[in-house]
């Protein structure tokens, strides 16, 4: 289920990094950069275990939301392993930050905020904070990494490169942060898109395997990550006009400023011309199986849920989650994600950030 496993069979330059971390002023923040399948998590696992063996208090921040080792997916997680571990999957997180997607595209704010907040938590207790990152390192990924580094201010950057693919990021911090350039190990295994999807499927299934369904009163909670309940509910005249004009059944509608936002179902298969500056719509059926973040009073994610049904008239939702009843009592906010997943782990697709 996890691509990376603990091994002591590493190139010597990895041991050089270990010696530097051992003698560095504490606490020390280490951010590992690299493309997809470059061995970032393998290196993080090696360093964490070796530092634990030396008696240091280690924090691991898993922000590789597409290939999370620390469950659940779609979150950034912080853990403090206190014994040697074979893979990230064995680390029990103490804090999660909800992102709501398996790709950082369109979620730069959440990625940066999550890593920053969890790093601040880690600094309270750890000697060494190891930050594992996503493999998005080109195009918009350069800007994401730049902003993340500027915000988190790591003491050390470890760059795993095959050639010079990280240089557009690294040159921005030359002379400002201690940088170590390492070659990607010949042992690094490449996974194709389907293999990565299967790994995620197993992780989703593992996370939701002991779930139960709760009926939630939405009026008692803060709803975020969506415009579903912003503005004012449309009146019956507006609803009837829109239904007649577009041949829709409108299940829920809001007027947000001068723009309408509706949840609809089609009642006729016709071509429609919609001015998106005036009207935004979303299919009711796509709300089912949407991943939700169940957020506590402190803003951290207590766990994930899958939205099964939402009754807009009564403002109640059916949510499937592995959280127990006592933990559910601590949920203060429901945050909408942008990935749809079944409890058997099958991913049903990503939604655009602006869809909801």
Image (cartoon, rainbow, N blue to C red):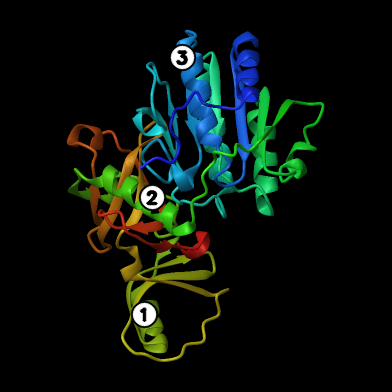
Q: CA distance from mark 2 to mark 3?
A: 28 Å
- The correct choice, above or below, for 37 with respect to 32 in the image is below
Quadrant of the image for the N terminus?
top left
**Number of residues whose C-alpha sits closer than 10 Å to that of mark 2, classed few (under 14), some (14–19) or many (20 or more):** many
Left or right: 150 as drawn, with respect to 264: right
Residue sticking out furthest to the bottom: 270
Residue 200 has which mark?
2
Which residue lies under the disc numbered 1? 237
Location of residue 308 (image quadrant): bottom left
Q: State which tag comes first along the sequence, 2 or 3.
A: 3
Q: Position of residue 55 (x, y in %)?
A: 47, 8
Residue 68 has which mark?
none
Q: CA distance from mark 1 to mark 3?
A: 66 Å
Secondary structure state at the residue bearing disc 1: helix
Disc 2 or disc 1, which is closer to the eye? Answer: 2
Q: Residue, x 62% and y 13% (percent of image)?
A: 19
- The correct choice, above or below, for 232 with respect to 332 in the image is below
Q: Position of residue 163 (x, y in %)?
A: 72, 44
Which residue lies under the disc numbered 3? 52
**Number of residues whose C-alpha sits closer than 10 Å to that of mark 1, classed few (under 14), some (14–19) or many (20 or more):** few
Query: Are discs 2 and 3 less than 8 Å apart at CB?
Result: no
Q: Residue, x 53% and y 43% (percent of image)?
A: 110
- The correct choice, above or below, for 72 with respect to 257 in the image is above
Q: CA distance from mark 2 to mark 1?
A: 46 Å
Secondary structure state at the residue bearing disc 3: helix
Q: Position of residue 337 (x, y in %)?
A: 42, 53
- The correct choice, above or below, for 313 with respect to 241 in the image is above
């Amino acid at each position: 289920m996890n691509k990376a496993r603990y091994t002591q069979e590493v190139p010597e330059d990895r041991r050089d990094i270990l010696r530097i971390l051992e003698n560095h002023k504490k606490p020390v923040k280490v951010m590992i950069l690299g493309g997809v399948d470059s061995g970032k998590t393998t290196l993080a696992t090696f360093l964490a275990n070796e530092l634990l063996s030396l008696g240091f208090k280690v924090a691991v921040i898993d922000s590789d939301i597409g290939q999370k080792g620390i469950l659940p997916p779609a979150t950034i997680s912080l853990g403090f392993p206190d014994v040697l571990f074979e893979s990230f999957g064995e680390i029990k997180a103490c804090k999660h930050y909800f992102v709501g997607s398996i790709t950082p595209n369109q979620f730069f704010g959440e990625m940066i905020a999550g890593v920053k907040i969890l790093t601040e938590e880690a600094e309270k207790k750890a000697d060494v904070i190891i930050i594992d990152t996503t493999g998005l390192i080109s195009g918009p990924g350069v800007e994401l990494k730049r902003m993340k580094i500027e915000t988190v201010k790591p003491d050390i950057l470890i760059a795993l490169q095959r050639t010079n693919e990280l240089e557009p990021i690294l040159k921005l911090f030359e002379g400002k942060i201690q940088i170590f350039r390492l070659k990607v190990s010949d042992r690094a295994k490449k996974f194709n898109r389907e293999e990565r999807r299967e790994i995620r499927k197993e992780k989703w299934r593992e996370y939701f395997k002991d779930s139960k369904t709760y009926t939630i009163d939405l009026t008692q909670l803060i709803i975020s990550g969506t415009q579903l309940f912003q503005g004012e509910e449309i009146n019956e005249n507006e609803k009837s006009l829109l239904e007649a004009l577009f041949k829709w059944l409108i299940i829920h509608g809001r007027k947000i400023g001068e723009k309408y936002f509706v949840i609809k179902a089609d009642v006729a298969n016709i071509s429609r011309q919609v001015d998106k500056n005036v009207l935004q719509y979303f299919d009711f059926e796509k709300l089912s199986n949407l991943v939700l973040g169940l957020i506590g009073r402190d803003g951290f994610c207590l766990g994930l849920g899958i939205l099964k049904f939402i009754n807009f008239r009564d403002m109640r939702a059916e949510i499937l989650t592995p959280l127990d009843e006592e933990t559910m009592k601590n949920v203060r906010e429901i945050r909408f994600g942008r990935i749809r997943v079944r409890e058997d782990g099958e991913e049903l697709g990503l939604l655009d950030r602006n869809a909801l």
